[in-house]
Amino acid sequence: MKRKSFKPPCAYRTRHQTPAKERLMNKVLCVCLLLLFTAVPCRSTVLVSSVSALISAVNAANGGGDKTILIADGYYPLHGSYLRITADGISVASASGKRELVILDGNYQTTEIFQIVASNVTLSDLTLQEASYHPIHVMAADDHDVINTVIRNVHIINPGQQAIKINQDGAKNYSANNGLIAGCLIELTETGRQQVWEINGSCYTGGIDAHHAANWTIRDNEIRGFWCADGLSEHGIHLWSFSSDTLVERNRIIDCDRGIGFGLGDSGHTGGIIRNNMLYHGPDHGQSDVGIGLESASGAQVYNNTLYHEHSYANAIEYRLAATTDVTISNNLSNRAISSRDEGSATLAANITTALPTWFKNPAGGDLHLSAPIIEIIDKGIFINGLTDDLDKERRPQGARIDIGADEYLIPSKTITLLSWIGLLL
């Protein structure tokens, strides 16, 4: 017997053949679905084009209003006002997506431009300048952790203190964790340096500074100019006061007296990775220090970074104090020493500390990409689990083994093979 294909009864009936009771039920169903969908709130967006409208939009979002705030292109002098975000899920960005077209200016009258005391907050595509303290201050709430802050493609110019500050709550019971800082430009200019000195009377300024912060990722940023003639500046990137499991990768740090730091003194750091970063510092400005510093930093991994210093400080990388244990430092390229201080311990492998300026494309400009396939570097790195790319997100390895330093040099495969054989024979 031939089986007939199944069709629902309604497929055989016209509107006039459908029973009246069924038509009524269909109408009721449609009305119910319409009410259901209209009752679900949509995530709305508000566009602002003045300081007063921006402040009102943030206050409204904190109270349950529109969560996405877009700022029209323009210059916004804050005149002492600041933006405090206290509700979860708020996003503030330029409407155009071009950070250089939206400038929020503190004029050193505003202490902090953004205060973030909520989770899942995103700041993106903005320029923030001249806050007398911190242009962005992320802090835990008084009764819970703050998580998942995203700061992306933000240009911060001339902060009075640290550009991005990450803190616990006042009682130090809760923390700000699991954040991302990516694609930002953070800088202190010559004009700003003079203004900051007048404000602070010291060199208390730096790039990113975090206390008791866990699981932050800091990648693909450029941080430059944090130095002072009459004092030692804060770090370009610094996580301490018992921070943990930080990933610092693919950043360029140029002319900062101290580059990247895990821990300080006995206020240490646990775990974490520092990889694929380039750090350059020119001649002495008056004060200079280490490129990458580990202090009371247990379990840290420091690998495939490139550092070139023209100042007088002797060390490129330091592992310091007896609490610095179970540390690995591998595949780094520098022109200065990698040294233990004050009983710090680490396992070192495949590092080069005798780099020449001719090895790099433009050291004075902070460009430490390799200028040529240097035999001492190509295919000389050791395998590291999880290392799959370089500073430029290009695949590692290109040859038989990974290269030393932050830059995986791209050359034809035949040349790589020849260099590998030459290297083995040397």
Image (cartoon, grey):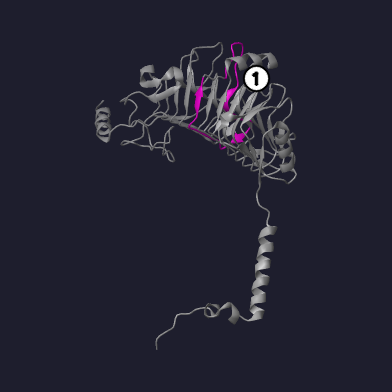
Specify the quadrant of the image occupied by residue 202: top right
Specify the quadrant of the image occupied by residue 2: bottom left
Q: Residue at x 31, y 35 (%)?
A: 399
Q: Amino acid at mark 1?
A: Tyr
Residue 292 in view in this figure? yes
Tell me residue 44's x, y (percent).
66, 47
Tell me residue 53's x, y (percent).
72, 36
Specify the quadrant of the image occupied by residue 164: top right
Q: Residue at x 43, y 36 (%)?
A: 393
Q: Quadrant of the N terminus?
A: bottom left
Front-lying residue, 168 or 256: 256
Front-lying residue, 361 or 242: 361
Q: Residue at x 62, y 21 (%)?
A: 158
Magenta residues?
A: 226-254
Q: Residue at x 63, y 29 (%)?
A: 74
- Under circle 1, the secondary element is loop
Tell me residue 402's x, y (percent).
36, 34
> Residue at label 1?
204
The reply to whether the magenta stretch includes residue 419 is: no
Q: Is residue 175 above or below residue 340?
A: below
Q: Quadrant of the C terminus?
A: top left
134 horizontally vs 327: left or right: right
Q: Is residue 299 above or below residue 259?
A: below
Front-lying residue, 252 or 155: 155
The reply to whether the magenta stretch includes residue 246 is: yes
Front-lying residue, 247 or 319: 247
Residue 264 in view in this figure? no
Q: Residue furthest front?
A: 16
